[in-house]
Amino acid sequence: MTDSLAQTHSDLWNELGRGVVDRRHGFHVPTLSTIGLDGAPCARSVVLRRIDAERGEIQCHTDVRSGKAAEIARDARVAWHFYDESRKLQLRVSATAEVLVHGAVADDAWARSAVTSRRCYLAPRAPGAVCDAPSPNLPEGVRDRRPTEEETLPGRANFAVVLTRATAIDWLFLASEGHQRARFTRDEAGEWQGCWLEP
Ligand SMILES: Cc1cc2nc3c(=O)[nH]c(=O)nc-3n(C[C@H](O)[C@H](O)[C@H](O)COP(=O)(O)O)c2cc1C
C-alpha cells in the first residue's frame, strides 16, 4: 500500500505490463466493452497483447470481420475491465479505440504472433456468422494441428490490432484493513492527473 498517487499510477501500468507476458496473471484476459450497433453495451474477453505506459496504449488482436471491429468503427469509445484475484486489484479503463488492419503496428503484431494464435484468422466465415451445426470455423486441414507459418499467411487479411488509448483509469485495491480507490484522467497535453476516491 502506498499513499502516493504517482506511485500508484506507475505501479498499475507495471502490472498491466506483467499481464501481457504472464498467462496466469489476472490481467492477461481482460474484458473489452464496446458500444453495440444498437447502442447497448457489448462485452467480451480478449487476450491482452501489448501496453505502452508512456502513450497510455492498451492493445488486443481481433478478426477484422468481428462484431467489435464494426462497433469500434461506428463509435470509438470502449471500456476495459481487469481484475487480478491474487493482487486484489481491479482496473476500469475508459479509452478510445481504432482497428488497425494495415500498416506497421498490425504488421509487427502479426510478425510476433505464434502460429497457434494466427490459426484463428484462417476462419473461412466471419466470427458470429450463423451456421447449421457447431463449427470450429477453421479450414479442414488445420483443425487438429499447428499450421505451418506458410499456411497461416492467408490469415493476415483477417488480422487486426485493436489499439486503444486510455483516457481515464479507475483503480481499486481491496484490503482487509480498508480498500483504496483512485481515479486517473489524461489531460489534453497527455499528462495524467490523479485523485483518491472513496472506495
Ligand atoms: C479466454 C478468451 C480469450 C479470448 N481472446 C480473444 C482475443 O484476443 N481476441 C478476440 O477477438 N476474441 C477473443 N476471444 C473471443 C471473444 O470473447 C468473442 O467471443 C469474439 O471475439 C467475438 O466477439 P464480438 O462478436 O463481440 O466481436 C476470447 C475468448 C475467451 C473466452
Image (cartoon, helix red, strand yellow):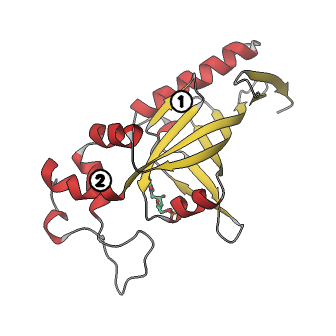
Q: Quadrant of the C terminus?
A: top right
The amino acid type found where label 1 is placed reads: Leu
Task: Tell me the element at label 1.
Answer: helix
Ranked by sequence position, the earlier of labels 1 and 2 is: 1
User: Which residue is painted at 64% across and 69% down in the image?
Assistant: 37
Q: Nearer the viewer, residue 192 or 24?
A: 192
The part of the image, by quadrant, that contains residue 189 is top right
Q: Nearer the viewer, residue 50 or 190?
A: 190
Q: Nearer the viewer, residue 90 or 76?
A: 76
Examine the rendered structure and indicate whether residue 67 appears above or below residue 17: below
Extreme-front residue of the structure:
103
Q: Which mark is residue 16?
A: 1
User: Which residue is painted at 41% across and 68% down in the image?
Assistant: 127
The answer to whether mark 2 is within 8 Å of ligand 1 is: no
Extreme-right residue of the structure:
198
Q: Nearer the viewer, mark 1 or mark 2?
A: 2
The residue under label 2 is: 156
Examine the rendered structure and indicate whether residue 68 appears above or below residue 199: below
Residue 125, given in percent of the width and then of the height, sits at 34, 73
Residue 46, given in percent of the width and then of the height, sits at 48, 50
Residue 90, given in percent of the width and then of the height, sits at 65, 36
Q: Quadrant of the N terminus?
A: top right
Asked whether residue 4 appears in the rendered view, the answer is yes
The amino acid type found where label 2 is placed reads: Arg
Task: Tell me the element at label 2.
Answer: helix
Marks 1 and 2, how far apart in space? 27 Å
Residue count near mark 2 (Cα–Cα under 10 Å), binned few <14, some 14–19, many ≥20: many
Is 151 positioned to the left or the right of 116 in the image?
left
Residue 10, given in percent of the width and then of the height, sits at 62, 18
Is 95 positioned to the left or the right of 196 in the image?
left
Examine the rendered structure and indicate whether residue 182 appears above or below residue 146: above
Asked whether residue 148 appears in the rendered view, the answer is no
